[in-house]
Image (tube, grey):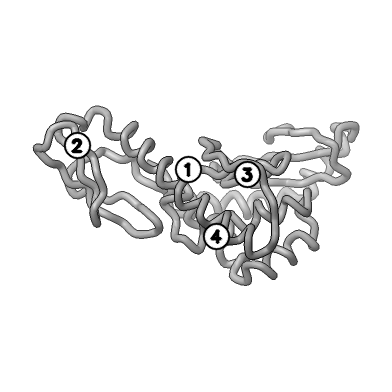
Amino acid sequence: MKNYTLIRSKRKTVALVIDPDATLTVRAPLRMPVFMIEAIVNSKRQWINRSFEKVKARPTAKIKQFIPDEKFLYLGTEYNLNFTTLKNKYFFDHGFYLSYSLRDKAKTIFESWYKKQAKIIITQRVEFYATQNNLRYKKIRISTAQKRWGSCRDKNLNFNWRLIMAPVNIIDYVVVHELAHLEFKNHSQTFWDQVELVYPPALAARQWLKQYGQLLKI
């Protein structure tokens, strides 16, 4: 019984991916018969169910109400939202400040501010690690992807804007991960060895994203 999303590509093996919303994505070779894919999925059913339970047990973010003293993450630290009578103002100074007159546009304003900060800070981290490891890339783009924290395509680097809510060490891990794809196009052991060589706490950062990534939203 099919209860997963099937994505076919020019790959040689089947990969089972548990998504943050506790759904299953199966990545399979272009010509692999469906019955073979089903057999692999069924053989991993216990692992899939255990993984679903782990994902469901992870903390989830509350829907933001944009009310006074509500907390918002920035670089891993929570800051209060403060309202001001200053007309049409929004700024950050050891806390978020927003005009009452802009409350109806609060989510759009927050996202815009986060995206600008993400571009600045992530670019700095990319340049640091690229220079340190003599790597060349083309462009950096801040994305609105729902499931990916980053990607590397044709030497262009894409990073999810929500990363700006995570601690800098988590941002560094994603940056190093995507830079490694400039040399290694897959997730082979050689790729992971390179990531850990450049950024030793990579495994811990990866686990942090799995555990707390759902909190990085507004």
Marks 4 and 2, how far apart in space?
A: 32 Å
**Would residue 22 be seen by someone viewing this image from the given angle?**
no
Contact? badges 3 and 1 (CB < 8 Å): no
Q: Residues within 10 Å of mark 4 (few under 14, many from 20)?
A: many
Within 10 angstroms of label 1, few (less than 14), some, or many (20 or more) residues?
A: many
Query: From the viewer's perspective, is 68 left or right of 13?
Result: left
Q: Amino acid at mark 2?
A: Lys
The residue tagged with tag 2: helix, strand or loop? loop
Mark 3 highlights which residue?
157
Residue contact between numbered discs 4 and 3, judged by CB atoms under 8 Å: no
134 vs 78, nearest the viewer: 134
* Residue topped by disc 4: 172
Spatial separation of the CA atoms under disc 4 and disc 3: 14 Å
- The disc, 2 or 3, on the residue closer to the chain's N-terminal end is 2
Above/below status of 90 relative to 171? above
The quarter holding residue 158 reads top right
Per the model, the C-alpha gap separating discs 2 and 1 is 22 Å
- Looking at the rendered structure, which numbered label has been put on residue 161? 1
Q: Are marks 2 and 3 in contact (CB under 8 Å)?
A: no
Badge 3: few (under 14), some or many (20 or more) residues near its Cα, within 10 Å? many
Q: Count of labels shown?
A: 4
For the residue pair 79 and 88, the one nearer the viewer reads as: 88
Residue kind at label 1, given as amino acid type: Trp
Percent of width and height locating residue 157: 63, 44
Circle 4: residue type? Asp
State the image coordinates of residue 45 (x, y, percent, origin top left).
72, 48
The disc placed on residue 89 is 2
